[in-house]
Amino acid sequence: MAAVPPVVWYLAIAVTALVSSGVLYALARPGGRWGRHLRSRFVLGVPWGTLVVAALVLLFYLVPQDGLTHWFQPLVIPYRAWSYFYPLGILSAGFAHSGPGHLVGNLLGTFTFGVLAEYAWSHFPTARGSQSFRSLREDPRARIAAFVAVTLFAGVFMGAFSLGPVIGFSGVVFAYAGFAIVRYPVGTIGILLAGDLLGLVYRALRSPTSTATPGLSFSSPYWAEIAIQGHAIGFFLGVLLGALVVARRREGSSPALVWVAALLFAVDRGLWAVYTYGEGGSFVLYRAGGVALLFLVAALVASGAGATGRDLIASIDLSRREAALGLLLSVLVALSAVAVPYNLLAIADGGSGFEDESGVEAGDYTVYYAEDVPDRFVTAFDVPGVQTSNVTVSGAIVVSEQRNIWWETVSERRLAFDGTQRIVLGGPTYRRTVVVNRTGWSAVGGPTTYRVRLRVAGEPWQFAHRSDPARAGPTVTGRNVSIDPLPGRADDPNAFAVNVTWGGERLGRAPVPANGTHVEVGGLRVIREDRGLYVSRNGTRVQVARKENYN
């Protein structure tokens, strides 16, 4: 069956969307009501604050992150929130993104939840008797500027108090949603569904058709990719700000609707995914505990949105609203405080941990390759009831004492699949690419042995790591064959030797022969045919190894 050109699918989506919208317009017959509603809250009916914020986020991706010239490979590492000792990361993490998909997803969230949050804030004063431009507080220009300023503050707040080297605008998007839920719970759920629709349309335009086949995955479980603590901080920050605004304006929505909206939003956006690190690179998901927390979150949000000024404890003049807002603030502070010890951890205090290893330098970064080493950050503090001391990592690790970075960038499993990976490093004034390369042989009936080398693009290779020798299961006349990766010789990716032993005694050793040739080792003829390695003696021939084949 002939493939349908993508432009046909684009036209199909555009035409059906226009037709469906036309049907809606004919049925609703708004008669200008939609425009009047928008103009009652927005100058000229346009959400200027949201547009400015989206433009700033896009501009950061295009210029500091170098997305203008490297759209699919932006600079990411220097703009993560590594610690308080690296202010650039703290200031930029809430606005930087790991790639175009990440960027577009958060921009879609901004254009949905951000618009509703700005509508709830309003460009025009909402109090009875107020008048635009009469004072700074009532000036639409100042109110738009205030919306943008609070958004920028929220982005920096995310970088300062999110746990781990976070990146992305999603924390602010969650703040938008929290703010909107307090005032417009039903509208927030509608926006939530609209956001899902926009995401689906974007994916359909980007990939009109696709074919999926089973394959290996080297990603963490999807719930372990959720920055739940950072998202929760953004959400509660938005709820707290929304509750303060609603209380001051004496506006509000039904607590029941707020409860439902908060619960559905938290379910849809994965705020139930409470997890910790396990041993051997695993993750532990506390699903039941997370679901229980959702109901507490819904109750807390509804209380903050619907609490009145009536006394709760008259003897200390504590109102229900003050108690609810104080509880929201306490939760926000508690969630934020979790990240402080980790952000105060200095790499220089404990060293990189690779003093005896071979690494390559790229600017103020050094890239090492190591296996089964303790994670420098995860193991820094013991969490009661959670095993973190046994968390180890294996792969290419980026270290920068100047930026307080220690991070596994390419895992050993990922490298074993791809063979070669590139790590983009740099900063506002420069960009470097470090190449990580692996070559190896899989012994028949035995393990795999391999060598890893590193280099800065355009510079010579440097030897980084070799695994233990791999011994093949088959024997020939009692002789065992093993493949041994050779140290050094970084310029030669095929630096492996064949060892032949008998009864534990070495009979011979020689380099693995080139394709189409053979070598005599320990009374055996070792033959290389394409990716296969064979040995023969007295008419007996068996395969002992096969060169690794990468994706």
Image (cartoon, helix red, strand yellow):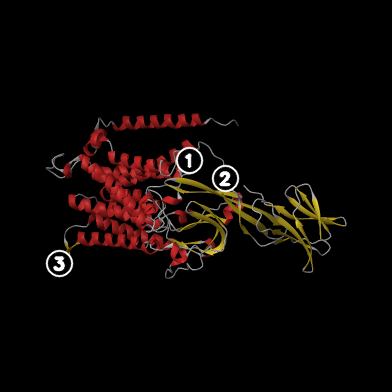
Of marks 2 and 3, the one in the foreground: 2
**In this rendering, position of residue 306 left or right of residue 406:** left
Q: Nearer the viewer, residue 534 or 314?
A: 534
User: Which disc number belongs to residue 458?
Assistant: 2
| Secondary element at tag 1 | loop
**In this rendering, position of residue 17 left or right of residue 133:** right
Q: Quadrant of residue 266?
A: bottom left
Q: Is 116 rendered above or below residue 390?
A: above
Q: Which residue is mark 1?
A: 70
Q: Is 12 rendered above or below residue 142?
A: above
- Distance, label 1 to label 3, CA atoms, is 62 Å
Give the residue type that dot 1 points to.
His
Q: Quadrant of residue 144?
A: top left
User: Which disc number belongs to residue 314?
Assistant: 3
Give the residue type that dot 3 points to.
Ala
Give the residue type that dot 2 points to.
Gly
Q: Earlier in the sequence, mark 2 or mark 1?
A: 1
Q: Is 191 rendered above or below residue 218?
A: above
Q: Earlier in the sequence, mark 1 or mark 3?
A: 1
The residue at 82%/58% (across/down) is: 524
Q: Nearer the viewer, residue 256 or 169?
A: 169
**In this rendering, position of residue 465 left or right of residue 432:** right
Q: Residue pushed farthest left?
A: 129
